[in-house]
Image: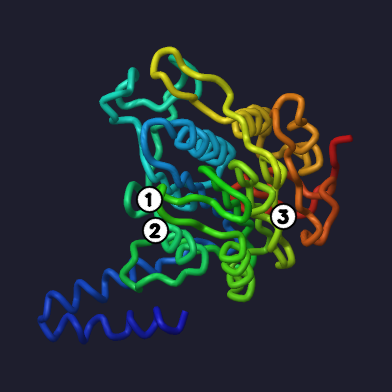
């Protein structure tokens, strides 16, 4: 607000000075700080795995990205972080494509904001808490506000209390919980939904303490998450069970759908996911049956639910 106004006020003076580098810097800061309309919803979608055998984690992230776009979140409001895109690998039997089924629809039609070595645990935490240089472009910043609902989706390899990032570092449950607490203190969300598809995923929710936050994990603390099937064409698993069935549920929704978080959990039983999804909703301030899934996938907060599916 005030900082942006001050920069705008100094723009004519900087232009009069005739220093093109100073003028370019001021313009870059103004562009980086450009804010969307208040109350718009945001999504942070992250795959932390690289290397060919982790193809499925990229597909997981792209399935959730596809659902968020279809249901109306603007691409500018989705920060997509892929530690490996896999589409251009020489081992890919479908060049330029990432598919969740053999010969299936190409999921790799996305705007990737952070990729390859740019995806680090530090980058994830700085993105969530907006501890970024002023020169960071808007497409690499989470510009949510106190009226926004924020979806955070994480997929990769995990162990108890941590998510492996780039095969050589970790994002821990306390770090994630601290970042979300900082977001709340900064007024960066109304509600936040954390989805985690990784082994021992429920352990990533254990340190959450912030009001307005819910988490849904693909597996219990003592469980692995399970891949769906191996591809004879490319020789690796294409997608994980939890995210595949999550995507199937999301495909049934429309922007006006009233299906709740409780409905989502019922649609993901251990009998089909082959691990035990865990919902952490005690901090949400409402019962899971009273919170619509679409609140985190629609372009903006839609207000309280009028009808909840039985």
Q: Is residue 86 toward the left or the right of residue 155 in the image?
A: left
- Across and down, in percent, residue 98 comes to 40, 27
For disc 2, the neighbor class at 10 Å (few under 14, some 14 to 19, many from 20) is many
Q: Is residue 235 toward the left or the right of residue 271 in the image?
A: left
Give the vertical position of 85 relative to 113 (above or below).
above
- Which quarter of the image is occupied by the C terminus? top right
- Across and down, in percent, residue 274 comes to 70, 28
Do the CB atoms of the residues marked 3 and 2 lie less than 8 Å apart?
A: no
Q: Residue at x 63, y 64 (%)?
A: 177
User: What secondary structure is marked by label 1?
Assistant: loop
User: Could you tell which of marks 1 and 2 lies nearer the N-terminus?
Assistant: 1
Q: Residue at x 81, y 58 (%)?
A: 282
Give the vertical position of 230 relative to 73 (above or below).
above
For disc 1, the neighbor class at 10 Å (few under 14, some 14 to 19, many from 20) is some
- Across and down, in percent, residue 287 comes to 85, 52
* Residue annotated with mark 1: 113
* Residue annotated with mark 2: 140
Residue 28: quarter of image = bottom left
* Residue annotated with mark 3: 214
Do the CB atoms of the residues marked 1 and 2 lie less than 8 Å apart?
A: yes
- Across and down, in percent, residue 20 comes to 12, 75
Residue 228: quarter of image = top right
Residue 199: quarter of image = top right
User: Could you tell which of marks 1 and 3 lies nearer the N-terminus?
Assistant: 1
Give the vertical position of 150 relative to 53 (above or below).
below
Q: Residue at x 53, y 62 (%)?
A: 37
Q: Label 1, label 2: how many angstroms apart (C-alpha)?
A: 6 Å
């Amino acid at each position: 607000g005030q900082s942006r106004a001050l920069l705008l006020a100094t723009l004519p003076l900087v232009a009069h000075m005739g220093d093109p580098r100073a003028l370019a810097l001021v313009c870059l800061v103004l562009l980086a700080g450009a804010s969307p309309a208040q109350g718009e919803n945001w999504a942070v979608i992250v795959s932390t795995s690289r290397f060919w055998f982790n193809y499925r984690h990229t597909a997981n992230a792209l399935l959730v990205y596809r659902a968020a776009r279809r249901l109306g979140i603007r691409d500018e409001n989705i920060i997509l972080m892929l530690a490996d895109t896999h589409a251009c690998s020489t081992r890919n039997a479908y060049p330029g494509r990432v598919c969740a089924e053999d010969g299936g629809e190409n999921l790799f039609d996305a705007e990737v904001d952070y990729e390859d070595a740019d995806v680090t645990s530090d980058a994830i935490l700085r993105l969530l808490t907006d501890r970024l240089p002023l020169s960071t472009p808007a497409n690499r910043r989470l510009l949510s506000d106190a009226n926004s609902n924020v979806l955070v989706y994480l997929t990769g390899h995990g162990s108890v209390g941590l998510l492996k990032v780039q095969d050589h570092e970790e994002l821990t449950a306390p770090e994630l919980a601290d970042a979300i607490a900082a977001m709340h203190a900064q007024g960066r969300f109304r509600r936040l939904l954390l989805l985690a598809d990784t082994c021992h995923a429920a352990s990533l929710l254990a340190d959450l303490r912030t009001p307005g936050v819910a988490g849904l994990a693909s597996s219990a603390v003592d469980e692995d998450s399970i891949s769906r099937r191996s591809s004879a064409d490319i020789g690796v698993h294409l997608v994980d069970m939890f995210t595949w069935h999550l995507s199937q549920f999301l495909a049934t929704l429309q922007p006006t759908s009233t299906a709740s978080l409780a409905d989502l959990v019922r649609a993901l039983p251990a009998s089909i996911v082959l691990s035990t999804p865990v919902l952490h909703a005690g901090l949400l301030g409402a019962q899971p049956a009273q919170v619509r899934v679409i609140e985190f996938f629609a372009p903006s907060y839609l207000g309280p639910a009028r009808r909840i599916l039985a």
